[in-house]
Image: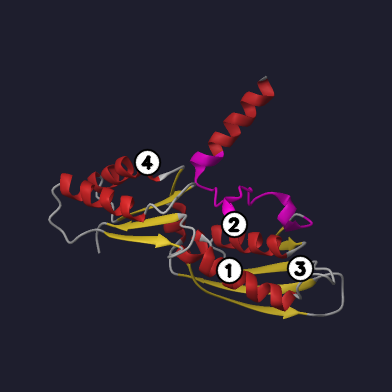
Amino acid sequence: MKKSVLCLLLAALLCLSGCGSFLEREYSVVEPHTSTYYESENPSVLRAENYQDLVNDLLVLIGSHAEEGMIFYYGTADMPSAADAAEKACREVQQQTPMGAYAVDYLTYTVDDEPRNYTAISLTLRYRRTAEQINGIVHTTSVAALYDLLTAAAQNGADELVIRVGYFDNEEAAVRKTVQQVQRELGSTQEPWQVHFYPDGGQVGIIEIILKK
């Protein structure tokens, strides 16, 4: 019983801490700090046993706002080559994942094919958002919390509100309606608040609302 309570408390602390840039492909929940992703627990080098690990590693780097990274790719003969996997993973992360679409400006990589049991992939990451903006993302299970979150943000004079939702089912219209309602109720005479969805046209996971330019 004590063990169960402790686990629940730890889970709650992780959610509140904001360090949960949890990996997001199909909304899988994986803790980025797990040693599974590190090469011999070396925090400067990540490891990937397959393509999905490679995607997750990129999201770990983005979650920590890393500007450079190294991944050891242990692909087997029946998997994509390191170069093909890196190209596909970079494109998927930037275009199809919420965090990549929201935060990343571009990704570049080089592949070291020196014979060994892994291929070293060196990455360079550039961002459209600051580390503070990424850390400031508010996590919520659904858009039901948007009204209260946006009202509080506006009353506190925030320039923007960025939320990450665990569940989103084509609710763009409902989100825009809520934003308009809050702005109207608060009597804001500014231009309409801007709403952006990430990824745009994909499986939305992050909603950005710009209150002040």
Which residue is under mark 4?
144
| Residue 81 lies in the magenta stretch | no
> Does the residue at mark 4 contact the one at mark 3 (Cβ under 8 Å)?
no
From mark 4 to mark 1, how far is it between C-alphas? Answer: 28 Å
Left or right, 163 with reference to 69: left
Mark 4 vs mark 3: in front: 4
Q: Quadrant of the C terminus?
A: bottom left
**Residue identifier under label 2:** 25
Residue type at numbered disc 1: Glu
Kindly identify the amino acid type of the residue bearing the numbered disc 2.
Arg
In the rendered image, residue 68, in percent from the top left (x then y), is placed at: 61, 70
Q: Earlier in the sequence, mark 4 or mark 1?
A: 1
Cα distance, mark 3 to mark 1?
17 Å
Mark 1–mark 2 Cα distance, whole angstroms, equals 10 Å
Task: Pick the quarter of the image with the N terminus.
Answer: top right
Task: Indicate which disc, 4 or 3, sits on the residue closer to the N terminus.
Answer: 3
User: Which residue is tagged 3?
Assistant: 73
Residue 92 numbered tag: 1
**Location of residue 72 (image quadrant):** bottom right
Q: Earlier in the sequence, mark 2 or mark 3?
A: 2
* Amino acid type, residue under disc 3 in the picture: Tyr
Magenta stretch, residue numbers:
14-40
Distance from disc 2 to disc 3, alpha carbons, whole Å, reads 19 Å
